[in-house]
Each structure stands twice: as structure tokens, then as C-alpha cells.
Image (tube, helix red, strand yellow):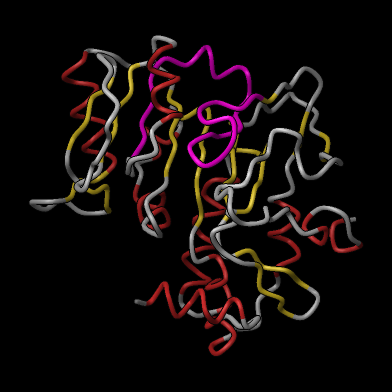
Amino acid sequence: MKYFFQNLLWKMGFDMSKIYHNEVNLNSLKKQLWPVTYDGLKLVRVGNQQKDGGYIVPESHKDIKLVFSPGTGEVDDFELELAQNNCKIFMADKNNITKKKHTNFNIIKKFIKSYNSKDTITFNDWYKDSIKNNNINDDLLVQIDIEGDEYEVILSIKPSIFKKIKILIVEFHYFTRILQPPFNKIINSTMQKILNDFVPVHNHINNNSSIMKYGSSSIPHCFEITFLRKELNREYFYQKNFPSSLDRPNLLNKKDLHLPDDWYNSKNNE
């Protein structure tokens, strides 16, 4: 029911976050989330080539053979393609309704949270159990789509595990709540934890949501960002061409939403 009312408000050009808006400086964060590139970087689409279920990743993902994907749902084209390329895939979702099968799929029916219970497990314990049971200790590709729980989960991952992640793909939900205390602290802390070690290489808005106007800023409600672990001796350059030719709408029956130009092409980012 709450999604019905939120979608109705979006159609009217309104977002609940405006009620509680807090003065926050978005310009610095927007600049940090401006996707970068470097000489030799090639991005490819893995998974569904036409709609939801596909993600944009560096071609170097082929060197990674260990994937953790909390929030399975029924759209698992991404995981299946990686499994077919000989990646070991660990998936977690209490309501898992995965229809596809593969010998490289390892699925637990629990939600990934920041605490353990009958129906939940922390990312740290999930990783530890998976590695122990499979006798592996490789670099990770992590793809997170857990409907708003991404903030608490990312903040709860131990540094020793976080540093093993080479490619991190996150669908950030409820991002307009960055205007609301205390959500702005949680969102900013999550972003800074990631940006300390990673650079964004792709950013795409989910067209199942909307974009809120806040003064001179445009704030997406939900978007997917692909991060790549920083190489300290690497020279990075801001990407200039948006949208990417690899982008596809999450929903085919709705117009795609593209990254607003105040996120990558304004005096705020000079």
C-alpha cells in the first residue's frame, strides 16, 4: 500500500522526503558519485541485455570467480550468466523464488541484515560460512539489491571482508531520504565507507522510481551504481557521455530515466 501512495505522489511531482527536508550539501556527494573511467577500462553488460536483471561491470569481472548476491528475487539472469562462466555464486533471500538452476548456485533462505536471527544472517557470517564450507578465499564481486537494507548491511561488513571486494554493485533505495535526519547520516556514512576504497564507474537510475527536485538539485529515489576498487597509482577521468549505450530501462513499459546533468555536467562539479 505504501508503494501505491508513494508512486501516486511521484506522479503528482511530490516526494515525502520534502516534508522533513534537512539542509544538506549534495554537491560534494554528487561529485564523488560522478562515474569515472581510465585508459583501458571497458564496461560490459552482464545478464539481461534488454531490461532489469542486467548490470554494467568492468570487463575485468572475468578474473573474479567468487560472487555474493544478497536479494535474489526472481530476476537472476546476472547470476546465471556468471555461473555459466564458471563463477561460484552465493545467493541469499528468505523469500527466494529463483526459478533457474545451476551447479554453481549456492542459496540460503535468509535475509542479509546487520544481525542474526532465525530468518536473518549478517554478511560477515554468511561470507565466513560460505568460505569455510567451500575452502575458497578469492577476490569478490558483490551485487546488493535488498530493498533499503543495503545501508545497514554495508556499514556492518568487517574491513577484513570489505577489502576483498573488487567490484561492488549496489541498488540504492530511498535515496531522497538523504534530506531527512537521521537518514542523511546513515546514507552519507554508507557512501563514504564505499568511496574510501572504490570509484564509481557506472550510475543508472531505476525507472520504477522517480527523480525529486530539491532547489537546484535532482535527487533520484533509486539508482544502481557499479564501483571498482581504487588503484592508487591509477589516473582517473570523469566520464562525459550520458546515458551509457549499455543502459536499459528496468521496466520496458516506462520511459527510461537518465542521470540528471547536475550530477556530472554543472558548475557544482567543476
Taking the magenta stretch, the answer to whether it contains residue 92 is no
Q: Residue at x 32, y 40 (%)?
A: 72
Q: How many marks?
A: 0
Q: Residue at x 43, y 27 (%)?
A: 164
Q: Position of residue 84 (x, y in %)?
A: 40, 13
Residue 76 or residue 28, whichever sits in front: 76
- Relative placement, left or right, of 7 versus 14 is left
Q: Is residue 17 above or below residue 47?
A: below
Looking at the image, which residue sits at the far front? 253
Quadrant (top left/top right/bottom left/bottom right) for the C terminus: bottom right
Residue 252 or residue 67, whichever sits in front: 252
Looking at the image, which residue sits at the far left? 118
Q: Position of residue 134 (x, y in %)?
A: 21, 15
Q: Is residue 98 above or below residue 215?
A: above
Instruction: Please report the bounds of the magenta region as a residue range.
Output: 44-70
- Relative placement, left or right, of 191 versus 65 is right
Q: Is residue 70 above or below residue 85?
A: below
Q: Position of residue 197 (x, y in %)?
A: 57, 38
Q: Residue at x 29, y 41 (%)?
A: 123
Q: Residue at x 61, y 77 (%)?
A: 11
Q: Position of residue 237 (x, y in %)?
A: 83, 35
Within the image, what quadrant is residue 59 found in?
Answer: top right
Taking the magenta stretch, the answer to whether it contains residue 59 is yes
